[in-house]
Each structure stands twice: as structure tokens, then as C-alpha cells.
Image (cartoon, helix red, strand yellow):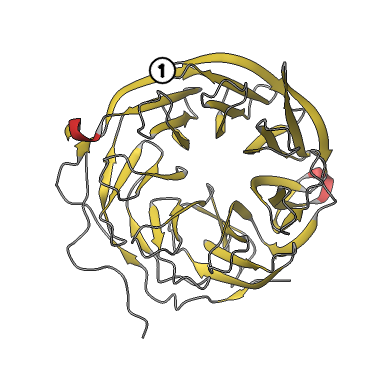
Amino acid sequence: MRIRNLLVPAATIVTLGACAATPPNVFRDTATFPTGRYPVALVVGDFNGDGKPDLAVSNSRGGGSVQVLVGGGDGAMLPGPEYTTGSVPAGLAAGDLNGDGKTDVVVARYGGGLAVLLSGESGFHLAALQSTGDPRAIAIADVNGDGKLDLAVTNCGPGSNGAVDYRHGDVAVLLGKGDGRFDSARMVAESDHPDSIIAGDFNGDGKADLVFTDSVWSSVNVALGNGDGTFRQLERVRAGFDGPAIFIGQGTEPALRTGSITLAAGDFDKDGKLDLAVGHTGVGVLLGNGDGTFREIVQYPAGGGAAVAVGDWNGDGVLDIASGASVLFGRGDGRFDGAARYHAGVGANAVAVADFNADGRPDLAVANLGSGSVSLLLARAAAAAAPAPVESAPAPSADPRIDDK
């Protein structure tokens, strides 16, 4: 099934610029830990069963590997085991895939399908290789309501001579058997170049829905779940990001943009409905209507191609958005103050959020593509946050949300 246009009117893209207020310095320390070459993805989990959050890192060069950084519970990360993936690793996802109470990892491998790594007494072991096409990203959720975790995957299409065809991709689900194995992939939708994918209940019916992005169309796409592993109402929302593009074909052919379009979900305006943060050349915010549709996108300059994550870093009870090592501070009504840029390594990109030092505050882990490292930004106590000399850009006082005409 192809995706049809459009979920909301998309003629207007509201873009908010920078201004001069200084946000609180929400991070007290930054520590950097070496990884393999070109770390492109992070995922948090307790991989050794000690009750402390660890990190799995996808290193996409130098042969390709998944590396574990073992958390000490005090903000320190120790080098852990490294697993060769056999193909170039891309996206990662974590969850208990075989019901043994331990956190497992799924690896999307360019040209190599999915690798399922189950956690055991001595680390991970390869449990299964699943053929899905050329996967980029993974979401884990129970999409058919049987109490077993399933996989949702974005795939690029196979091209001639083993090359990747960036114009014939798809999104597929693999239903879990509860023992770390999965049924064959079932296509949910065709998509030219699907990137990130997340799962959540976006229409309030208690069933898992999927949201994924497409770099060719610069779009966010919604597939509402039926609760039995099938999906309906495939719709496209224009994300509207500008940036470098490689043009394919002629005339009305869309542009394939460099860099992925990433996603995170949270309730940014405290109305009990899931909203979306969209990362690419900046950060876009789509406020949810609670029925699987969204208001028009509002864009904020931040990140510059980095992935996005959600957390409350200034302790005001309102969700903020991280894009790489930049943070947009939420106002609680769906608007955000502009990006505060914090120190990380070269090429800050993938992000993950957890309390890495057990102080009750969310910390931010950032993968640095250029320097081959992960930076850990440890959060201050909320009362101790003080102004910091970082660039910032609050939004205008006017409500940027557009009334439907």
C-alpha cells in the first residue's frame, strides 16, 4: 500500500528563529568515552543485569561492530565486549525479546538484514538473522496484542548489482514468537526512502501505531494499528526540511536529502496526547490531535542533522528536546525556547537518555561520529541549574500553532 497525502494542510511551514536569552546550565559534567569508528546509533539497556544503565553503540566502520559501554552507576562507562556484525550496522533497538527478564538487542545491518542478540550470563549471543531487505531503523512494540514483543523495521529497497535502491523501500513488521525468534517480515507500507521509526499510541485506542520518516519526500508518515499486527490509514505529513539534496530523475521527481530524518515522541503541551519531535537540519515539532493527526509543523534551528530525544533537563516538569548536544527547553504549551548548545565531541549525532549516575535526573549520551566516542552529559540538580554562556534562541511570544482553516 502506498502512502496518501495529506494528514493536515501543509501549505504553511512555520519556522522560528534565534534570539538572545540564556538558558540554565543543566549539565554539570561532560565525560567522553572512546568507541569504534563512526558510531551511528545508541541504545540504553541494563545488559549485564546489575541494575545500572549501559549503552550499546553501533560502530559502522572498521569492519562494523556493536560495542557495549558498561555503566558504573556513577556516570562512568567502562569498555565492555564488542560484537562483530558481519555487515555494516545501523539502527539499534533494545527489549526483552525472549521473556527471560534480560535486555536483548536487535541490530539493523545494511545489506545484511536484522541480527538478534540475546543477553545471557556471559554477554550477548547471536540468536537469529532475519531477512528484511536493507534495514535502517527498528522499533520494538507488541503490535498484535499477544504479550510478545514484535519488530517494526524501515528498509531501503534492493537495487541492481547488489546496490541499494533508495527509491523502492518499505516498512515491515516481524511478529515475535516470544523466544527471540520472529515470523517473516510483513510489509506495512511502501516508502521511497524510509528512515527512522517509532511506536506509540497516537490515537488513544490502546493499540500500537507506527510513525516513520521518508527522506525523499521529507515527510512523517503515520500507520494506525488495528491491534492484530495489521495497520490502516497510512498518511503523510510534510516535514518541510530544507538542506542538501541529490536529485533523482527529472521533472517532478522528489529530492533525496542527505542525512536521516529522526523521531521522538512525548507530550509537549500537557494535553495527554502524544506529540512528535522531528530532527533533520533543525528540530520540527508536530502537536498531536489525539486521533493520529497532527497540527502543522513548527521548526526550530538546532542540531544540524542530529537525532532527537526527549527528557526534562531543567527540572520544571516540562519535556525538553535534545538534538545531538543541543537542547530546546519546553514551555509546557507546545512551544520551545531556542537551542542551547553544549559541549560534546566532533559530529555529535545519535542520542540516548537515562539516569547514568543514579541521582534521579535524566542524563544525555551523545555519539560523536567524527571523534569516535560517546559523550555523557550529566544533569545538574534542578535547584542548582545556573545561567551558562551557551548560544540560545527562544521562540517568539506568539503562539506558533496554526489554527485549522
From what the image shows, is residue 2 above or below residue 111? below
Q: Work out which residue is located at the far bottom of the displayed protein and give it.
A: 405
From what the image shows, is residue 72 above or below residue 152? above
Identify the residue at horizontal 51%, vertical 73% (top origin).
Answer: 291
Asked if residue 304 can be seen in this view, the reply is no
In the picture, residue 398 is in which quadrant?
A: bottom left
In the picture, residue 339 is in which quadrant?
A: top left
User: Residue 379's spot in the image, x, y percent?
Assistant: 32, 30
Residue type beneath disc 1: Asp
From what the image shows, is residue 218 above or below residue 44? below
Identify the residue at horizontal 44%, vertical 75% (top origin).
Answer: 10
Q: Nearer the viewer, residue 368 or 209?
A: 209
Identify the residue at horizontal 81%, vertical 44% (top origin).
Answer: 162
In the picture, residue 255 is in which quadrant?
A: bottom right
User: Residue 267's spot in the image, x, y percent?
Assistant: 40, 58
Identify the residue at horizontal 62%, vertical 60% (top origin).
Answer: 208
Left or right of residue 216: residue 324: left
The residue identified by callout 1 is: 74
Judged from the image, the secondary structure of the residue bearing numbered disc 1 is loop
